[in-house]
Image: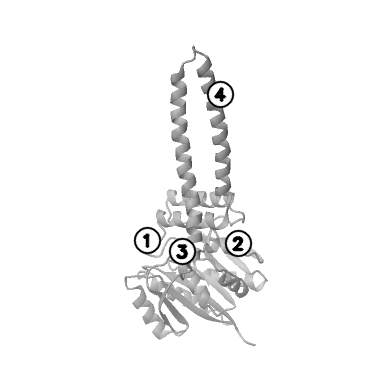
Amino acid sequence: MEKKKISLVIPMYYEEQVANECYKRVKENLDKLQNYDYEIIFVNDGSKDKTLSILEEIASNDKNVKIISFSRNFGHQAAVTAGLQYVTGDAIVIMDADLQDPPELIPDMLKLWEDGNEVIYGKRKTREGESAFKLFTAKMFYKTLNSLSDVEIPKDTGDFRLVDRKVVDTINSLPEHNKFLRGLFSWVGYKQCAYEYERKERFAGKTKYPLKKMLKLASDGIIGFSMKPLKFLAGLGIISILASLILFILALVAQFNSAYNASPAVLGISCLITFFGGIQLLSAWIISEYVGRIYDEAKQRPQYIIDKKINF
């Protein structure tokens, strides 16, 4: 009987401090799975440190290790997308290199897959080593995203998951460029279940998702999965019309009532002009985000450029 195959996709960005330990722990756990073949695909996302040279040395000694190296940094989602394009396994695991998502959990996730689940996503019960600000912003991120999105995205999840081959084939068939993968995995459907675990601290190094990148990820999620911001602008338009009618009535009162003190009205009008001027700028920004995405898709540039591939 032919063995089933597991593919691991691990994006790497300035991970010279964790690369060897990541490979060691991943390999130790995969070697225990005697009924499965495996491949490990590291995607170097334009690292300028020793990450690539370390990976090349690992790949020279282990043909199960494959490397995709980008010509520059294209981002975490692009790195995962590239890995998914080249996997050959029946089940695919996506995980980060920092070992916050332990490879020791893969056997349990495989059991859930063998039971018929097609997407097993890691759900964090705890998040060790993360600041109160990080935890708060993550909570608000999912709360905001789910309130705006037409597809429910599980809370306290990341990209750590095991997915069936047919799910990956579906994801690969989607032509969009700015992919928000954890949203897309929810959008495509299939039989999904959560696997709860305790998320550990990084093995070494610093997070590669500072506030700026988290805001970009949030923007990709909201714009990619919701039209509600545009509908919100319609609501603001109605409010503007009502406010203008109220101001018109106040102006008539001031015109025909000589005892009426017009100064507060003038002040109120000035405040409202400033307020609705800000709304117009906000509206223009929201619309420009959607138009910008349309422009980006229309250019049809590749989501990433591969500089080299090893062991493929």
Label 4 or label 2, whichever comes before in sequence order = 2
Residue type at tag 3:
Gln
Of badges 4 and 3, the one in the foreground is: 4
Residue type at tag 2:
Ser
280 vs 150: above or below: above
206 vs 256: above or below: below
Label 4 or label 1, whichever comes before in sequence order = 1
Of badges 2 and 3, the one in the foreground is: 2
Residue behind mark 4: 249
Q: Are marks 4 and 2 in contact (CB under 8 Å)?
A: no
Residue at 47% of width from left, 47% of height from top?
284
Kindly state the secondary structure of the residue where label 1 is placed: loop
Residue 186: image x %, image y %? 60, 62
Mark 1 and mark 2: span between their CA atoms?
29 Å
For this rendering, which residue is in front, 236 or 33?
A: 236
Kindly state the secondary structure of the residue where label 2 is placed: helix
Q: Are marks 4 and 3 in contact (CB under 8 Å)?
A: no
Mark 4 and mark 3: span between their CA atoms?
61 Å
Residue 271: image x %, image y %? 44, 30
Residue 55: image x %, image y %? 38, 77
The disc at residue 100 is 3
Q: Quadrant of the N terminus?
A: bottom right
Mark 2 and mark 3: span between their CA atoms?
22 Å
Is disc 4 surrounded by few (<14), some (14 to 19) or many (20+) residues within 10 Å?
few
The disc at residue 206 is 1
Residue behind mark 2: 186
Label 1 or label 2, whichever comes before in sequence order = 2
216 vs 103: above or below: above
Is disc 3 surrounded by few (<14), some (14 to 19) or many (20+) residues within 10 Å?
some
Kindly state the secondary structure of the residue where label 4 is placed: helix
